[in-house]
Amino acid sequence: MENQSTVPYFLLLGFSKNRHLQLLHFFLFFILYLATATANLLIISVVAFDHRLRSPMYFFLMNLAVQDLGIVSVIVPKSMINSLMDTRHISYFGCVAQLFLFTSFEGSDFSLLTVMAYDRYVAICDPLHYEMVMNWKACNKIMIWVGVAGLLYGLFHTTGTFSTPLCSNVVNKFFCEIPELLKLSCSGFNLVEVGVVVASITAALGCFILMIVSYAMIFQTVLKIPSMKGRQKAFSTCLPHLIICSMFLVSGCLAYLRPPSNTSSFLDLAFTGLYSLLPPLFNPIIYSIRNKNIKSVLSKLWRF
């Protein structure tokens, strides 16, 4: 593939050449995908059909589950099919689409987590104006902006990543990931994508600062609540979101801020799986465990 300006297809990482290990990989990814899809679909169904959960917090949680379901649906099925069919191929346009959709869902996910932090801030620090600030019209507008932000994030990264000629088609990850694709550039330096990354980091830093400020003011307000029960109730609505934000940020930093390597290692795969597969699985579980209303509805559904 040397000195080629375009590639007709890409070769994703093959976990093993042993047929039994390939089938084991398919089975493990199938179980992971089934568990993730089931958990997120349960959250979506519970919030959509139970009238007691008609509030902005649950509305945003339902949309977070939609984003998480999109993330795993973009990358996991293709890896499963490749293992089952004993192949590593993904078409050029399939790789472009996978990168665009994955980054779009990831961008929407982070934007939505920022919105959820603001929602908790208004609910706890300014409860008298909560219904006026976070009314349904405002929530729908917010979700439109979250979707637009995610699509622009995906579009800019996809355009930046594929803006230079590629001299190889071997991707050492199980899906089309930005750092791995950038290594294939013939020029070795992609100025367009560097600009996109700088802009993305600036936007992410702004969102992170907004989260920090929101929770600093939340904790300041909660500590002023005279009753222990009141403080516990306020903290209980914030703790799942804090855990999810921390998991998202830590796993993303571990995956993207490590020194680049030309070869794939078990540690690389572990970090990739950590930020791309585990958050969509654990987000609905964390919210279900910590939220009494969701647990109550799920227990009723389980009895039926």
Image (spheres, rainbow, N blue to C red):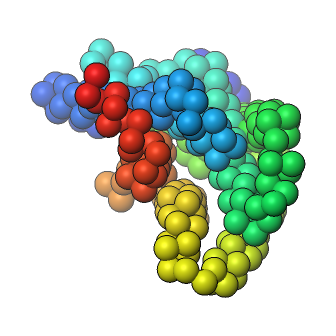
Instruction: State the image coordinates of residue 109 (x, y, percent, origin top left).
Output: 64, 44
Residue 188 visible in the current orientation: no
Residue at position x 56%, y 36% from top? Answer: 52
Viewer-side residue, 205 vs 200? 205
Q: Could you tell me residue 119's position as x and y percent?
A: 72, 55
The quadrant holding residue 234 is bottom right
Residue at 69%, 73% (x, y): give it.
218
| In the foreground, 167 or 245 | 245
Residue in the picture at 58% in, 20% down = 94
Q: Image check: 3 left or right of 231?
A: right
| Residue at x-position 36% and y-position 59% | 267
Q: In which quarter of the image is the C terminus?
A: top left
Extreme residue toward the front, this view: 227
Going by the picture, which residue comes out furthest to the left? 20
In this rendering, position of residue 23 left or right of residue 271: left
Q: Can residue 93 be seen in this view?
A: yes
Residue 191 falls left or right of residue 26: right
Tag count in the figure? 0
Determine whether 94 is above or below 215 in the image: above
Q: Which residue is at the far top?
A: 85
Quarter containing the N terminus: top right
- Residue 243 vs 155, above or below: the answer is below
Of residues 236 and 27, which is closer to you in this image?
Answer: 236
